[in-house]
Amino acid sequence: DKSKSGSRGALVVIEGLDRCGKTSQSSRLVKNLDELGYPAELFRFPDRNTVIGQMISSYLNSDSQLDDRTIHLLFSANRWEKRSLMESKLQSGITLIVDRYAYSGVAFSSAKGLDIEWCKAPDMGLLAPDLVLYLDISPEKASERGGYGGERYEQLEFQKKVAQSYQVLQDASWKIIDANRTVEDVEEHMRDIVLDYVKTCRNGKSLSQLWL
Ligand code: 2DT
């Protein structure tokens, strides 16, 4: 029953290197779920629309310089400022597809050399995703796709380090998606996996907290 009342939506996070296809696949997923009668909304981090998000955006465009730990904490704060909104949407039955989350936070900052436990600490207690889909592509292949946009971090050597950091973060909630396949294949595969989780969450799986 697609309109089952009192049941929550699923929290689904999409992660991967720059140019892995995350952003277009996230939108396709939301559209596919909606069309199948499962309400879904897209979130993305950083959310550049808030005051904190504007500070992050200016850092990413190299219009401002910030210490590595300072920018790390801003990225985390940018997730915390959306936590209660995300929770109420989930409780109202909406599935959230989230383009990047705390895993990006830890992967990118630890790729700069920051201690991984230090990086995880500020995100502890955020909503834990029911599912993380990691769009797997080699850093070399990603860099060949249409070129990087020129933001900070969009460099092959750095992306190689990010890929290694992501590996350390994988846990039971992760599924690795082969992002080398066609856009349509990836889309279909993601839709089928997510549908399973949406159904499980409707059947009463409770929300938990990240890294606690
Ligand atoms: P987009 O190109 O997807 O907008 O990402 N990043 C992101 C971090 O370093 N820490 C974080 O917590 C998050 C969410 C990844 C912009 C860049 O910001 C990086 C790429």
Image: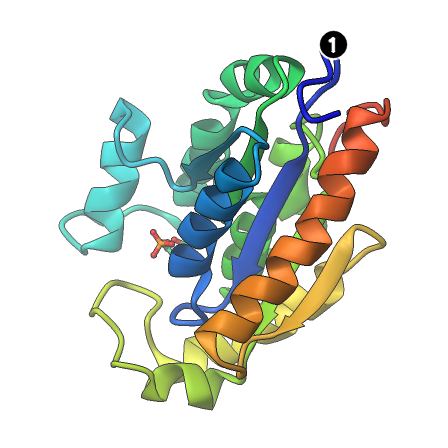
Q: Is residue 95 left or right of residue 159?
A: right
Q: At 46% across and 59% down in the image, what residue appears? A: 25
| Figure quadrant of the C terminus | top right
Instruction: Note whether residue 119 is visible.
Output: yes
Image quadrant assignment for residue 198 = top right
Q: Which kind of residue does numbered mark 1 sit on?
A: Gly
Pinpoint residue 98: horizontal percent, then vertical percent. Answer: 51, 42
Question: What residue do we see at 55% from left, 76% from top?
Answer: 179
Structure colour scheme: rainbow
Location of residue 61 with respect to 98 vertically, above or below: below
* Image coordinates for residue 36, horizontal then vertical, percent: 57, 40
Along the line of sight, which residue is nearer the eye, 32 or 163? 32
Q: Image check: 133 left or right of 168?
A: left
> 32 or 150: which is nearer to us?
32
Q: What residue is rendered at 45% in x and 90% in y? A: 140
Residue at x 58%, y 44% (from the top left corner): 102
Between residue 52 and residue 197, name the one nearer to us: 197
User: Measured from the top left, where is residue 66 in percent x and y?
Assistant: 30, 46
Q: Residue furthest left?
A: 63
| Left or right: 57 as drawn, with respect to 99 | left
Number of numbered tags placed on the structure image: 1
What residue is pinned by disc 1? 6
- Choose top left, top right, bottom left or bottom right for residue 121: top right
210 up-or-down from 178: above or below: above
Q: Residues within 10 Å of mark 1 (few under 14, many from 20)?
A: few
